[in-house]
Image: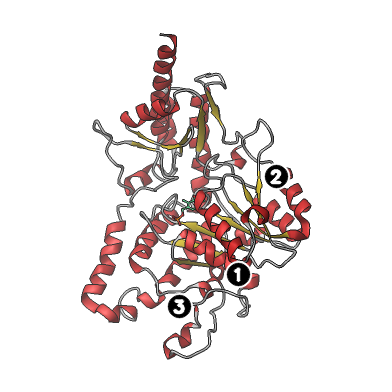
Amino acid sequence: MTFEPTLDFARQLDAQDPLRDFRNRFYIPPAPHGGDSIYLCGNSLGLQPRTARAAAEQEFTAWEQMAVEGHFNGDSPWMHYHETLADATARVVGARPLEVVVMNTLTVNLHLLLISFYRPTATRYKVLMEGGAFPSDQYALESQVKLHGFSPDEAIVELQPREGEYTLRTEDIEAKIRELGDSLATVIMGGINYYTGQVYDMAAITRAGHAVGATVGFDLAHAAGNIPLHLHDWDVDYACWCTYKYLNSGPGGTSGVFVHERFAYQPDLLRLAGWWGHDASERFKMRKGFRPMAGAAGWQLSNGQILPMAVHRAALDIVEAAGGMEALRRKSELLTGYLEFLIQRLELPASVLEIITPADPAARGCQLSLLVHQNGRRVFDELSEAGVVADWREPNVIRLAPVPLYNSFQDVYRAAELLTKAFLVKADDLKN
Ligand SMILES: *Cc1c(COP(=O)(O)O)cnc(C)c1O
């Protein structure tokens, strides 16, 4: 599509957008000086679905009216609540329902999965991850290697971009995996890097990892609900994600877990166990001896967090109603492409502004990360003051994430206009 840098054109794109009405299913927070904000921060916390409160309310009512009986009675008995999320969750990440479960929170799940899929030996103990991974993932891995008696400096290998580049090349990731060979125990990377917005080639990385006998897992915090995923077909071993970013399921919301089907019927696969992972038909017999359920459900520990799961279910319903990830992705590519086009039209020199997110749509999701070399924080503050909710990452990156479910092409147009204004003012400042 040939874009045009006019408000009329943005309006036209909105008029043609089959998902334009989905915006009305969310609460858009107000801007500081009135009107709706331009919310480009769904990479940090997705907006509240208008159906979320009623979904939670329903469970409050069930609790009020049935109390303990709610586990077994009512529209959606709590004992089986997590099962009601499996189909929609599986569609979001390209899995079979058996391969997914919703439970806990993200970092907790990362640890639970590493207990099973990072099983180091004296010679095969290394972990490969992207340099500058999200801090929680770094800390999780540090503590996991220590748990097994290794030193993080020795056991954790971090991938770095080539000199003068900001993102990783797949061939370099594959080469590092080959180089580590049979010292490599597991690869654990983001599906999308939170800082640069780069999508990693999960199929290629999984193939390379398996070729040297390592397990391969992904933290999909920035990928789930953002891009279509095919975890089963890509043969990924394990993955987890949060639901409060692109899946709009509320602050501190629950998390999803994927364990490939080939591990579904391996009860002896080591895991940290709890009663909710135990064979459901025997769970209440309170017998000794853990017998896990088949599939990802066998990694559950505790009885389900009904209130966060109720909100998550309401949010997943919206993804389904929109036609699923492929439909969201079609709009997302246009929306982010339009933002990129408008920013490029600023024609700022690379010494002032660079987009460090890959230009290839296949190598990015909806987020663009702007590396602002001069006055970044002031540009960001000015955007905030004007009602653009973006996010700032030290030392000098502004992340803008137009989300296809609730952002419009006019949002993107107005955000770019305000960005232009902020930069022009800054350029004048520099002259004075
Ligand atoms: C958002 C995010 C987290 C947050 O972890 P929580 O356990 O949900 O607090 C962790 N890792 C990555 C890659 C993230 O993007």
The residue lying at 63 percent from left, 78 percent from top is 266
How far separated are the C-alphas under marks 3 and 1?
Answer: 17 Å
Q: Is mark 2 within 8 Å of ligand 1?
A: no
Q: Quadrant of residue 263?
A: bottom right
Packing grade of label 2 (10 A; few <14, some 14-19, many >=20) is some
* Label tally: 3
Return the residue at label 3: 276
| x, y percent for residue 190 | 57, 51
In the drawing, does residue 98 fall left or right of residue 203?
left
Q: Which badge, 1 or 2, is on the more N-terminal residue? A: 1
| x, y percent for residue 396 | 48, 32
Image vertical order of residue 7 relative to residue 106, above or below: above
Q: Are marks 3 and 1 in contact (CB under 8 Å)?
A: no
Check disc 3 and give the amino acid type. Answer: Trp
What SS does tag 1 mark? helix
Check disc 2 and give the amino acid type. Answer: Thr
Front tag of 3 and 1: 1
Image vertical order of residue 223 relative to residue 261, above or below: above
Return the residue at label 1: 116
| x, y percent for residue 375 | 44, 23
Return the residue at label 2: 170
